[in-house]
Image (cartoon, coloured by chain):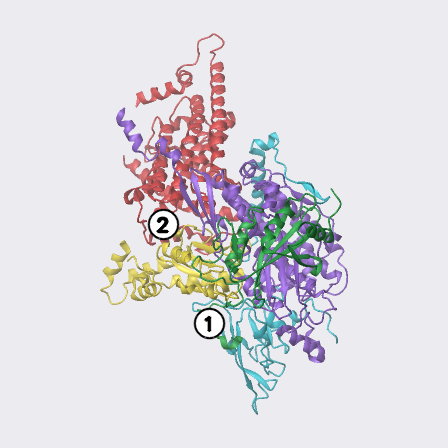
Chain colours: A red, B green, C yellow, D purple, E cyan
Amino acid sequence: MLEKIILIVALFSVTLLIATYLTLAERKVAAWLQDRIGPDRAGPWGLLQPLADAGKMFFKEDFIPTNADKWLFIIGPGIAMFTALLTGSVIPWGPDLEVFGTTVELQVANVDVGILFIMGIVSIGVYGIMIGGWASNNKFSLFGAIRASSQMISYELAMGISIITIVMMSGSLNLRDIVEDQHGFNWYVWKQPLCFIVFFVCAMAECNRAPFDLPECESELIGGYHTEYGSMKLGFYLFAEYINMFISCAVISAVFFGGYNFPGMDNFSGNTLAVLGTLVFFGKTFFFIFVFMWIRWTLPRFRYDQLMHLGWKKLIPIALVNMLVTGVVIAALSGWFSGEKPKTAEPMQTKVKTEQPDKRLSMNTNTH
Amino acid sequence: MSNPITSELLLQRLQERFGEAILQHESPYDLLTVEVTPSSAHAIVKWLKEDNELALSFLTLLGAVHYPDQTGREMAVVYHLHSLVHNVRLRLKAFLPIEDPSIATITDIYVGANWQERETFDFYGVKFVGHPNLVRILNEDSMDYHPMRKEYQLEDATREDKDDRFFGR
Amino acid sequence: MGKVEVVNGVETFNGEGFQLAMLDKVIAAARANSVWPLPFATSCCGIEYMATMGTNYDVARFGMERMSFSPRQADLLIVAGTISKKLAPILKQVYEQMAEPKWVLSVGACASSGGIFDTYSVLQGIDRVIPVDVYVPGCPPRPEQIIEGIMNVHRLVKHESLRRRYSDEYKHLLTKYNLNEDE
Amino acid sequence: MSDIEQLKKQSLFSNDTINGEIATLNLGPTHPATHGIFQNVLKVDGEKILSSEQTVGYIHRAFEKLAERRPYNQITPITDRLNYCSSPINNLGWDMTVEKLIGAGVPKRVDYMRVIIMELARIADHLVCNSVIGVDTGALTGFTYMFQQREAIYELFEEVCGARLTTNIGRIGGFERDFSPVFHEKLKKFLKDFPKHFNEFDSLLSRNRIFMDRTIGGGPISGERALDYGFTGPNLRAAGVDYDVRVMNPYASYEDFDFIIPVGTQGDTYDRFQVRQEEIRQSLAIIHQAYNNLPEGDYYSKDIPEFYLPAKEDVYTKMEALIYHFKIVMGEIPVPVGEVYHSVEGGNGELGYYLISDGGRTPYRLQFRRPCFIYYQAYPEMITGQTISDAVLTLSSLNVIAGELDA
Amino acid sequence: MESLSNRKKVVSDKKMTFWESIYLPAVLGGMWITFKHLFRKHNVTKYPEETREFAPVYRGQHVLKRDEEGRENCTACGLCAVACPAEAITMVADERKKGEEHLYREEKYASMYEINMLRCIFCGLCEEACPKEAIFLTDRIVPTYFERDNFIYGKDKLVEKVDERIDISKRQLTGKRPQKS
């Protein structure tokens, strides 16, 4: 139990720290892409910049607009922050660690439906934005909130379908199983590049990152849902955004890029492997965070209706077809069409079952 | 394209069509300037635009000039028209008395005249009869005079950091 | 707000308590390094401010590249350009909407004094409607001058006590500008 | 079941209210998309714009009244502040207007120098507009790349006149000084470097599908309608009408140069963007032509000593020069009586000066034809039926400059 | 609409090719461009530490020159004040008294000379107007202040110090006709 608490605290602080410094990283990356320097006057190389921002926001006047719904206005950022922090708990951050003879799993909760848990929590996260935007009693905020909710719902679908494809291949909803399945260099991205692209795009949309940052797009909606927010409440929203980005990138690297697996990992074992694996995992995550930022500072953003078009008319069909093809291939490989009975034992059985999404859902709710 | 239209031809056509209404004409700096009666200005602008041969169908500029010394015709409304096809420009002027500076609007001929007329009203108080929304455009609605008329001061009277004695006021 | 209580609690000491003075300094330094501007750019100076934001001068070095067009999130109101009498009430409203602590930088001749536009329609200096902290001369000022102005604002921020905004002088200042009718 | 229906009826988001709900949205005066100060009150149904109403005049500075109180040479700094993105065009256009009034010719070298400066200014103007379109679509990086190039143009201006933005460049009868050797150096460097960076910017946006989807069909206007509204410049050309003052009524020896008039087809945001992009290339070509053929000679007209300030050393030595010097500065040179209209192709279209002189030291009346002011009134028509995002992009692609709009 | 000139060319092509319509090539191309900038040296003038060289003709803060013998050039003729479109210059003329010849070059001098730097638009017309080469704009920038009153620059700030001359010869020569020697 103690190790879990330690892990939770560690994860909590690491997530917060990373999110804090992601704000700096974003500004630095933007600056480098634009031939600039970025913040460099707060501490050496601007390293204290996030702390300065946080310090300032803590001591800024806490403002609630007169016509706003007070409680919802306060709850909004809270929900966003809470849900963002929650998702990190099911991600397997590394191989098992041996400490004083006990085996420590570098994962707060090894939930069997880990991937469903993430998707569920992320979809609660949109309530934070929606409530905040609605409660502000500002039209721009409301527009942001509406955009956010419809965008999240649309992209969650394509995201879910692409995840199903991966689940079909791995035969499990457990994130650790999925990661373990990609041992060495056997990553899912090689088998499912299309699925990866769909998932990646959806992840960007879920995080409200440009080119999908419609809920807060500066040039149209001023600040979108957080137009009326100042001080630390705004800080919570910005924080939540960066935590979401961090978690999304972690999920991407776990699901598609083998998590803590890396080529040549068999040469190591024990704690060395655990540490190396964790480092590799964080390395991959940071790479994707960089890609997120890189894309943000390169591309123009979509228009609201085009975003919907992309989601419903392109990504979902692509994901569906991809899923069907994958299903057929899996079926063919396991001998469905050759008239034989499936030879392989248990894992394949589940794979076959997961072909139908409805069944899978009901099955898993039953087990829990 | 038909034969090119020159200023002379243009003037000739105008005189043929609106003999009475053409009061004066000159060509300062090669730009034909015609003074017309206020009542005929609308018809002339309309005819010039709709006449296929002349095709003076582009309103370049609309404004007013205030001549406080010319009694009875203090306010001049000036139209600059341009035929893009023939590259001929024409300046039309109509003089109005300061007591009642009203002239027919040309917003029904040129949509773009809307704001220019509002601006002219704002600056000079020229009333464009039939304008859909003749209110001030650049200045505050509460302003009670037409600032571009010659009798009004330019300077802001509230400033403190300037000493008027040094600037001849 | 919490910070009011903190301030009152230590008030009994002779002068400022050590911790409070430290807190004061730390927070002031934090604020100085994270001044989010609200560019109220109306005309020419706005373009020069854009140049200041651009690569060659990179105002981001001061932690200022996050522009907040929402007044709630901004710390520094950068008034760049002519403010006409028609616009003055809007400027005042934007200033009122900003959350404390807030500063105002008046960029350029027009905003500061009207510049060449000594005319019936132009406000002869924004200090007639809102209090100004730093004036930047020039028409428009070079980015160097704007940065000078920003650094002057930083100086001001660094030396401002947390409690200045509750002082009588500050209240008096607001009263002078008719800005505190709600409290 | 009935409870749910009951709830649905009360709900704000139930079906029958959301379709009929018309909201009013204030775009401006300080909205980030207005890039200046003006207000659009939009009536929206969801994101769709039903109608729009504009308020302008927030930075009305009384240019025309001011011009009636300032001597001719002091009006140049005022014109700087009209379209401040390309102030040299305004300055030189004003100088040419006065030259037209007094009937002065200038040496060929002055013309070519003017062309170089004006085309540099046009590039600077269009760069702002197009990179700001980029910013409004969310691509900030292109903006920073192009502002580095703009900075290079600023430096060029600074070499000639000593200021970056509000240049006050040129005098009646020529320039205050010749191009310095540093200017030549910097211009050559600019001409060499610019196309590379510009193409980079172009490929960031031009053929990117996201950008094309955003801009194609946004804020369209037909050629006829545009003419009716009095559009000129790139916005008119985007609608397919090839009206360009530089070609129709050449000034400053524009007839010597070979360039094309880029036009669009529908007058939408993409057309405007592309027309401006091509105009930048054409301007660059014109600068090349003018610079390569830059004639030798004087940088000012010797025929009008009563308008062009004499050299300082002459003022000390020659009585005549001293008298002229005082007269010019005091504004006591007799100016011909008359009225003159002169127009140049500004950054946004036909920038006209209608000048009436009564022979006094100041103009009797000076009216500016401000292209922004005239075409901005078409904005509601262009965005009706479009979404808010389109409205924002249309606004930035129209390149409405508040200083020119409100004068 | 018929063509008005023979130089018309349609430049906007709205048809997308297949490759353009699948987003990715343009996206990746754009990312490649920005990626290249990642390794480029930054192009920033870190202002307070580094300064950029101004053009010699830059129009910054004014200076009232002294001649070689340290006498003020200004003769208070008022031309600069007349020439100022912002009306930022005010001056009071005074007669030079006996014994002041080492201070002022001409018989008249400005006993009070003020420029309101907050009004000034740095257009350079005063420099051009001056017949005595007394006032020049320089490539120094006017600092910023917290108070409005500080911007009224009197003679104490404008007149150059005798031992600390400000070189303006470059701006006199740049681009000007060759001086007759």
Q: Which residue is drawn at 41% across and 65% down?
A: C128
What label does residue C15 carry, if any?
none
- Tell which of A66 and A112 is nearer to you: A66
Residue under the image location 58 percent in, 36 percent down: E26
Which three-letter amino acid code belongs to the residue tagged 1?
Answer: Asp
- Total marks drawn? 2
Q: What amino acid is at disc 2?
A: Gly
Q: Residue furthest top?
A: A339
Q: Mark 1 points at which residue?
A: B161
The one of A158 and D253 positioned closer to us in this rendering: D253
- Mark 2 belongs to which subunit? A
SS under mark 2: loop
> What is the spatial separation of the Cα atoms under label 1 and label 2, in whole angstroms?
38 Å
Q: Residues within 10 Å of mark 1 (few under 14, many from 20)?
A: some
Q: Is residue E51 above or below residue A245?
A: below
Q: Position of residue C166 (x, y in %)?
A: 29, 61
Indicate the position of residue A359 as horizontal and vertical percent values.
37, 18
Q: In this view, does A139 lie to the left or right of E178?
A: left
Tag 1–tag 2 contact (CB < 8 Å): no
- Is any part of residue D166 visible from this angle? no
Q: In which quarter of the image is residue E86?
A: bottom right
Q: In which quarter of the image is the C terminus of chain D?
A: bottom right
Residue under circle 2? Answer: A230
Outermost residue toward the front in this view: B20
